[in-house]
Structures are given as structure tokens and as C-alpha cells.
Image (spheres, rainbow, N blue to C red):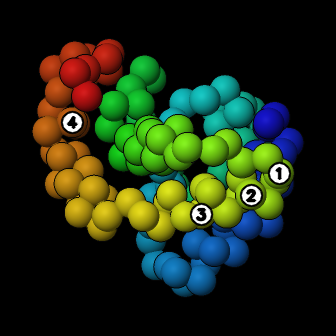
Amino acid sequence: MNSEMYVDILDNAALPTLGQYFEEGPFLFQQDNCFIHTSRLAQTWFDEMGVQKLDWPSQSPDVNPIEHLWDELERRLRSQPNRPSSLQALTSAVMDAWMAIPIITYQKLVESLPKRVKAVIHAKGGPTSY
């Protein structure tokens, strides 16, 4: 993916979805510091659209719960006895694995955020044990 593709996704998918859920109310957009997220093109888009971003430590995926969910999803997919042999089978396997992740997993990740943030602050934005 490059910056142009990212901005296209923001413009055509993310912004309309955010508009549906938040209407005119305030929200903070969370993203990491991947180069496409911090590109001049992306920054210009955020400024022009008036989308406020959550400050994010420069080297810390540790506080992003989705990273741990991707990990869980990958473990579930790798534990399946047969690898998908088509795009349709892969899509189905991913959706099934995602839906099988218990809600408690999400809750625990969200509840662990204060500890994660403290650990990142203590590590001055560097890696943590999470």
C-alpha cells in the first residue's frame, strides 16, 4: 500500500463510516506511525478534512490492541489442519477465525490499555513487555 491508496481508503471508506457513527460529534482517529500514515499527502488530508488524530508514540505498537488481535487471528488460522486453497476459502477461514475470537479477548485488551500506556511512558516510547 502507498500513501495514495491510504488516502483513497480514508476518503472513500473511513470518513463516511466515521460520519455515520459520530455524525458531527468529536472523535480521535487512531493510527500508528507507519510511513504512509505520516506522509505529507496523508497529513494534508487529515488537515483538510479536519480529522483530529490521536498522538501516538513513535515506536510503540504495544498500546494498539488491534496488533494483539491480529496475532490471535493468525494463531487461529495457523492452527487449522488445512490451508485454504482459494481466495474464497481464505476469506471464509479468516471470517470464521475472526468471529470465533471470544468477546472477553477484546475486553481484556481494552482493559489492559492503562497498564500498556504506563509501560510505554516508562519506556519513553520504546518497546515494552507487551
Q: Earlier in the sequence, mark 2 or mark 3?
A: 2
Could you classify mark 2 by the number of other residues whose Cα lies within 10 Å: few (under 14), some (14-19), or many (20 or more)?
A: few
Where residue 17 appears, as percent x and y from the top left, is 63, 74
Disc tally is 4
Task: Return the residue at label 2.
Answer: 89
Hey, what amino acid is under mark 2? Answer: Ala
Q: Secondary structure at mark 2?
A: helix
Q: Residue at x 73, y 66 (%)?
A: 13
Where residue 67 appears, as percent x and y from the top left, is 44, 39
Q: Earlier in the sequence, mark 4 or mark 3?
A: 3
Task: Return the residue at label 4.
Answer: 116
2 vs 4, front mark: 2
Q: Earlier in the sequence, mark 3 or mark 1?
A: 1
Task: Return the residue at label 1.
Answer: 86
Q: Find the distance from the CA under tag 4 to the CA under tag 3.
A: 28 Å
Q: Which corner quadrant of the image does residue 106 belong to?
A: bottom left
Q: Secondary structure at mark 3?
A: helix
Hey, what amino acid is under mark 4? Answer: Arg
Task: Return the residue at label 3.
Answer: 95
Residue 17 seen: yes
CB-based contact (under 8 Å), mark 1 and mark 2: yes
